[in-house]
Image (tube, rainbow, N blue to C red):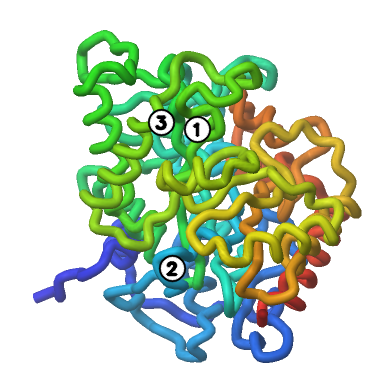
């Protein structure tokens, strides 16, 4: 009698590869970089082109992840009961957030877009693990269906925004493998991703939208309903949707347009539709924490001001883009100034989801270095935020914001492999990736 499969990673392996037996991966051993000093057991893949990761089979990717384990033990069968990296309940106050556009790296076949969850898994071996004193956290750009064209790619200039989502009808066809959802559910697929990320020593989170005209409520065989924050049933559905996905293992929620909640600085608000009232957002963050029982759950707000108590009392732990990352002395000043603020701190950005390109490699590398070292004591570090583009540079005629607003395939022959090869820069991007890794390697022991 066949032994029952006890975790979602092995369940996924059994369904996709018909084997849960893992073997050490020699390509990973030849491609890895180690942290310096007392972080030499922390390792990840470096000096590669992203397609080299994305073209691998799911089994090869999981073997790569297990080969990189800093425990120095190789598991021939992926273990049960994976724990999240432990940095305490307020870990989000110090973390480095790296947003991965899991839709852009999904499998593109002709006009179809699918299986972004596998691409997110395959990119994990090349994400530096967390440092001694703070966590690295991946933020996935897409979880729920986008309003127009979910499951399809479109022309390079045709809108297919990731900023408009549907709630109540499951998860995005860009991301989840619905061909096998009768054997392993969407929530189990997310659990597999989260277990693999946690095994890598990486925290995970996701982006959510709060502009009400960018939200729809969907039900099978019915017209979509416009979301409204003044409708208690809609608010309850929103909370339930957040709770369900947090319960799969995510510990961070990146809140788009959080700066403007309650009508604050509304003159600079670029979203569409009303936002929650301040007290509503307090209720929402409190309820999500209470219902999940996740004491480590972190909320990150897009942008920040010097009214830091406003965000802390809203239930947030970190903000983005308050301090310029170009001047390390500014970062050190604010790190020292806020060292006694242990629940919330504003952060620094290498780039964000609105970045439209034009940042030189040298400037990015300087920003990353400043974000990771702008402090006197590691315990006083400010949170930082960067994009996939800051680790794996995109081709020159696209940018982070463009790929959030559109979903083109760059494939030359209708295959996923061609799209992956064309999405990113070539030799110079590989050299840049090596230099990024060298920065992390020098500072990951802190």
Report which residue position mark 3 lands on.
278
Q: Relative to 252, say whether 158 is above or below.
A: above
Residue located at (43% from left, 68% from top): 198
Q: Of label 1 and label 2, which has the lower sequence position?
A: 1
Q: Secondary structure at mark 3?
A: helix
Q: Relative to 271, say whether 331 is above or below.
A: below
Q: Secondary structure at mark 1?
A: strand
Q: Secondary structure at mark 2?
A: helix
Q: Relative to 423, say whether 6 is above or below.
A: below
Residue located at (27% from left, 53% from top): 247
Most foreground residue, 162 or 94: 94
User: Given the current orientation, which residue lies at the most extreme left position?
Assistant: 1
Most foreground residue, 329 or 87: 329
Residue 76, image quadrant: bottom left
Residue located at (63% from left, 17% from top): 267
Residue 151: tell me if it is visible: no
Q: Residues within 10 Å of mark 2 (few under 14, many from 20)?
A: many
Report which residue position mark 1 lands on.
113
Q: Of label 3 and label 1, which has the lower sequence position?
A: 1
Left or right: 368, with 183 as reference point: right
- Disc marking residue 198: 2
Q: Relative to 204, say whether 445 is above or below.
A: below
Q: Position of residue 381 (x, y in %)?
A: 65, 66
Q: CA distance from mark 1 to mark 2?
A: 26 Å
Residue located at (68% from left, 40% from top): 352
Q: State which quarter of the image contains the N terminus.
A: bottom left
């Amino acid at each position: 009698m066949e032994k029952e499969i006890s975790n979602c990673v092995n369940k996924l392996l059994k369904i996709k590869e018909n084997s849960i037996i893992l073997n050490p991966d020699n390509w990973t051993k030849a491609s890895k970089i180690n942290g310096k000093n007392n972080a030499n057991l922390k390792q990840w893949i470096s000096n590669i082109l992203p397609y080299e990761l994305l073209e691998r089979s799911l089994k090869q990717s999981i073997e790569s992840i297990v080969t990189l384990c800093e425990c120095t033990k190789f598991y021939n069968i992926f273990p049960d009961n994976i724990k999240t990296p432990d940095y305490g309940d307020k870990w989000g106050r110090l973390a480095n957030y790296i947003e991965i556009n899991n839709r852009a790296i999904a499998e593109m076949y002709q006009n179809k877009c699918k299986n972004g969850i596998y691409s997110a898994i395959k990119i994990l071996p090349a994400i530096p693990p967390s440092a001694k004193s703070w966590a690295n956290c991946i933020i996935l750009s897409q979880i729920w269906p986008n309003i127009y064209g979910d499951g399809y790619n479109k022309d390079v200039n045709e809108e297919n925004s990731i900023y408009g989502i549907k709630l109540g009808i499951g998860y995005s066809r860009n991301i989840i493998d619905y061909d096998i959802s009768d054997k392993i559910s969407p929530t189990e697929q997310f659990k597999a991703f989260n277990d693999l990320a946690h095994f890598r020593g990486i925290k995970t989170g996701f982006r959510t939208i709060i502009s009400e005209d960018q939200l729809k409520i969907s039900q099978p065989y019915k017209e979509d309903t416009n979301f409204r924050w003044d409708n208690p049933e809609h608010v309850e559905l929103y909370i339930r949707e957040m709770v369900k996905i947090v319960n799969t293992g995510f510990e961070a929620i990146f809140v788009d347009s959080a700066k403007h909640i309650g009508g604050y600085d509304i003159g600079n608000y670029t979203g569409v539709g009303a936002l929650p009232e301040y007290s509503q957002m307090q209720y929402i963050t409190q309820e999500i924490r209470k219902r999940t029982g996740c004491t480590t759950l972190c909320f990150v707000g897009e942008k920040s001001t010097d009214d830091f108590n406003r965000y802390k009392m809203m239930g947030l732990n970190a903000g983005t883009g308050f301090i310029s990352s170009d001047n390390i002395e500014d970062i050190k000043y604010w790190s020292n100034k806020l060292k006694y603020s242990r629940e919330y701190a504003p952060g620094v950005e290498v780039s964000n989801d609105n970045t439209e390109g034009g940042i030189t490699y040298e400037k990015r590398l300087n920003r990353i270095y400043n974000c990771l070292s702008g402090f006197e004591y590691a315990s006083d570090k400010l949170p930082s935020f960067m994009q996939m583009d800051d680790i794996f540079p995109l081709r020159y005629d696209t940018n982070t914001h463009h790929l959030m607003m559109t979903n083109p395939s760059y494939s030359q022959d209708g295959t996923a492999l061609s799209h992956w090869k064309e999405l990113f820069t070539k030799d110079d991007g590989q050299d840049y990736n090596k230099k990024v890794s060298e920065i992390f390697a020098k500072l990951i022991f802190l």
